Amino acid sequence: MDKKYDYLVVGAGLYGAVFAHEAKKCGKSVLVLEKRSHIAGNVYCEDVEGIKVHKYGAHIFHTNNTEVWEYLNQFTDFNRFTNSPVANYKGELYSLPFNMYTFNKMWGVVTPLDAAAKIEEQKAEMAGKEPENLEEQAISLVGRDIFEKLVKGYTEKQWGRDCKDLPAFIIKRLPVRLTFDNNYFNALYQGIPTGGYTKMVENMLDGIEVICDTNYLEEKEKWDAMADKVVYTGPIDAYFGFSLGYLQYRSVRFENELLDMPNFQGNAAVNYTDRETPWTRIIEHKWFTFGKDEAGNDLPKTVISREYSSEWKPGDEPYYPVNDETNGALYKQYRELADKEANVIFGGRLGEYKYYDMDAVVASALAMAKQELK
């Protein structure tokens, strides 16, 4: 039986959409299957009262890769959003990443020289000692005050365990800027797609057949019979029926609220860095685009999302791969199985069990498409 499609792409997120677009451009026939009821994967934005809400958490595009930036600008243009989060520690507000505004609020210092001296004084308690855990590593980098107020509580909520029980390597470095620069990513290109990410992915998939609400793995043989090759962007362990065990993730839970006010916190992201506040941060989605996309945008309402970090269990949404030694070894075993699947390409955050920024996902998909479609 002749195959109906050259490529079956499983997953309509960034990786799948980029590959599908490139394959179609090369004259290949493509079918995209998506398990969810919508395209765009975790960058999906839904419209609530005229506000583009990042349903699966805040996604701020940033890159130093000119090729990726120019590639995406075929499908959208980006606004001028710059990520400048604020930290709330028991009602005290601090600028992030750590910069002169932070140090002035923390210690009253005014000059970079004074700030540097204060940091060195704070780091002294770890002098000559090799950090044995995350707490000691953070203190060796920025000192006790910043650790206690801006690192400890947030990190413990993120990982669900005490900083003394976390390995030092999790924090290889902490950005310290002796300037008044609060641009978090400090990337050459940064912004949010005008009209939202969903529109951008929709443009990528223009002219390509997409079927949503369809779980490829439930009828794998049927779908495999329809295409010469499969591009699989789902969890690699799920593809093999979890036969070697489950890979672990950290998960995130969101509580969304539509508020009858124009402005809740005045910033897109506010991190809650004390241990007592149960959420890690509040996102106010309006500020990703408000005043940057539509002139005269004066929406009277706002949408906020409280974000809670949680342990992952089977059935939860997998967000962040736990790239420790145990999971690395298990992924390697799955990778060996994947290498034997002659007509399947495994790609993306879940397919490769790898934490990817958005620009790296796009770059990876482009590289694979170039190699595959040459």
Image (cartoon, grey):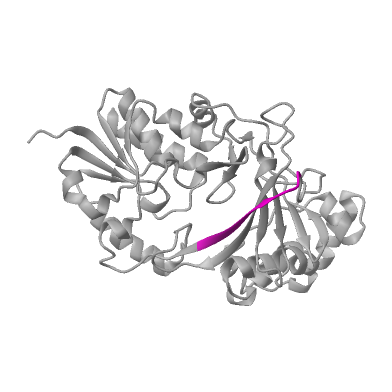
Compared across the picture, whether 335 is left or right of 200 comes to left
Looking at the rendered image, the quarter that the C terminus falls into is top left
What residue is at 61 percent from the left and 59 percent from the top?
307
Compared across the picture, whether 75 is left or right of 159 comes to left
Compared across the picture, whether 98 is left or right of 205 comes to right
For the image, the number of numbered tags is: 0
Q: Main secondary structure of the magenta part?
A: strand
Q: Nearer the viewer, residue 339 or 93?
A: 93
What residue is at 42 percent from the left and 66 percent from the top?
248
Residue 59, horizontal then vertical, whole percent: 57, 45
- Whether residue 97 is visible here, answered yes or no, is no
Compared across the picture, whether 6 is left or right of 157 comes to left
Residue 227, image quadrant: top left
User: In the image, is residue 135 part of the stretch drawn in magenta?
Assistant: no
Residue 149, image quadrant: bottom right
- Whether residue 200 is visible here, answered yes or no, is yes
Specify start and end residues of the magenta stretch as a single range: 251-262
Residue 240, horizontal then vertical, whole percent: 25, 59
